[in-house]
Image (cartoon, rainbow, N blue to C red):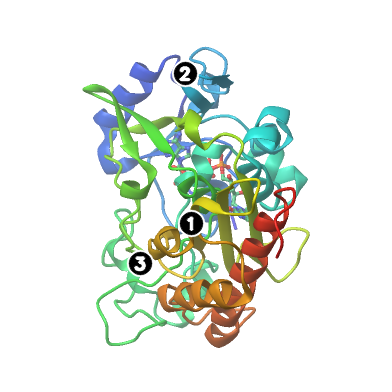
Amino acid sequence: MSMPAFRLERPRSVAGAVSILAAHGPDAMILAGGTDVVPNLQMKLFSPRVLVDIKSLAKVCRLSAIEWSPGNGLRIGALSTLTAVCESLLIQEKFPVLARAVATIAGPLQRNMGTLGGNLCLETRCHWYNQSEFWRKSLGGCLKLQVSDALAGKEGPVCHVAPGGRRCWAAWSGDAAPALLTLDAEIEIAGPAGLRRVALAQFYRNDGMDRIALGRDELLTAVRVPPRMAGRRGNYRKLRVRNSIDYPLAGVAVSMDVDPRGVCRDARLALTAVNPAPLLVKEVGEWLIGQTASPELIERVAQQAIRTAKPLTTSGSTPVYRRDMVRVFTRRALEEAWRETAGAPV
Ligand SMILES: Cc1cc2nc3c(=O)[nH]c(=O)nc-3n(C[C@H](O)[C@H](O)[C@H](O)COP(=O)(O)OP(=O)(O)OC[C@H]3O[C@@H](n4cnc5c(N)ncnc54)[C@H](O)[C@@H]3O)c2cc1C
């Protein structure tokens, strides 16, 4: 589990980071908290020549600030730690779905080191990919590694999840993205042409290998949530092997705006760990707006969520069980969000 050799760069500005990334292209990789990158380097999943340590930018460029204003909404710097996000009273009060989802990520050590930006740019995960070099070689490698820049052609072309196909089914396994999708979040990206903003929903590609729409010379600088999403009820439910630390095997995020009579004004639901991207279940809003809670309605939404989820083989659980837990979690998360509104009968 030794690390491959690399040069460490510590830029002093966002522009400096962008120019290092642009100069080295596929040979460079961003390092934030390192809680995903370092284990992956140790397992020789990639071997970049240059690691660009952006933690040094936390103080100088507002990259670790959490700011709120009624006009502009919430802005979270990409280098904010997961602990800072889930312990922020502002986020707990105004955006509970985000605080609750982030509080389930890994354990306290990883949350203290890991950043929100790193979480949104996480590598997709798979039972056959996230293994030691020795383990992988005994199976002839996997499709995701075969096309990765550093190891192109060095490991086998088979997807062990869906043999015969040419698609990588590694799963999106982050917890913050589904919560932020339900809050209509945008991300701020810095590149050679300056800053651009993208809807988070457009950022993910639903492709285990080419997971995010981020150029080699770009980095994520902040996450923004519009002010109209503040104060919504929200919940996050997560299936994992060990509740104290593990990645999700399935996750359901819900955010709702319910009036005092219990009538839904707006609702959003997103899934994680059951596809190569975190996904918004679009029909949910259409079905729930204008409705009061009923077991039949909630079950209908839960069935639709199952149709969207396509979990494939992984360690720790079966696809059938994970799909069924998506149904159960959808039901529970909706019931809780409705119940949290005073006076709403469920
Ligand atoms: C034991 C263990 C359990 C874990 N459990 C969970 C879990 O339950 N849920 C979960 O979601 N995660 C989990 N993780 C993964 C990880 O801890 C978190 O996702 C964390 O938020 C990653 O952030 P980081 O700053 O450490 O990212 P890094 O490891 O530094 O980077 C992760 C990826 O994002 C890229 N990146 C980082 N920052 C930026 C940026 N600003 N712009 C562009 N690209 C960037 C890196 O190049 C890399 O590809 C776990 C990790 C471990 C070791």
What residue appears at the point 59 percent right and 79 percent down from the top-left corner? 315
The amino acid sitting under disc 2 is Gly
Picture coordinates of residue 168 (x, y %)? 34, 71
Q: Is residue 79 above or below residue 243?
A: above
Q: Give the quarter of the image for residue 304.
A: bottom left
In space, the residues marked 1 and 3 are separated at their CA atoms by 44 Å
Which residue bears the numbered disc 3? 144
The amino acid sitting under disc 1 is Gly
Which residue bears the numbered disc 2? 71
Which label sits in the foreground, 2 or 1? 1
Q: Secondary structure at mark 3?
A: helix
Neighbour tally class for label 1: few under 14, some 14-19, many 20 plus, Cα within 10 Å: some
Q: Earlier in the sequence, mark 2 or mark 1?
A: 2
Picture coordinates of residue 81 (x, y %)? 63, 33
Which residue bears the numbered disc 1? 290
In the rendered view of the protein, which quadrant contains the C terminus?
A: bottom right
Left or right of 196 on screen, residue 268: right
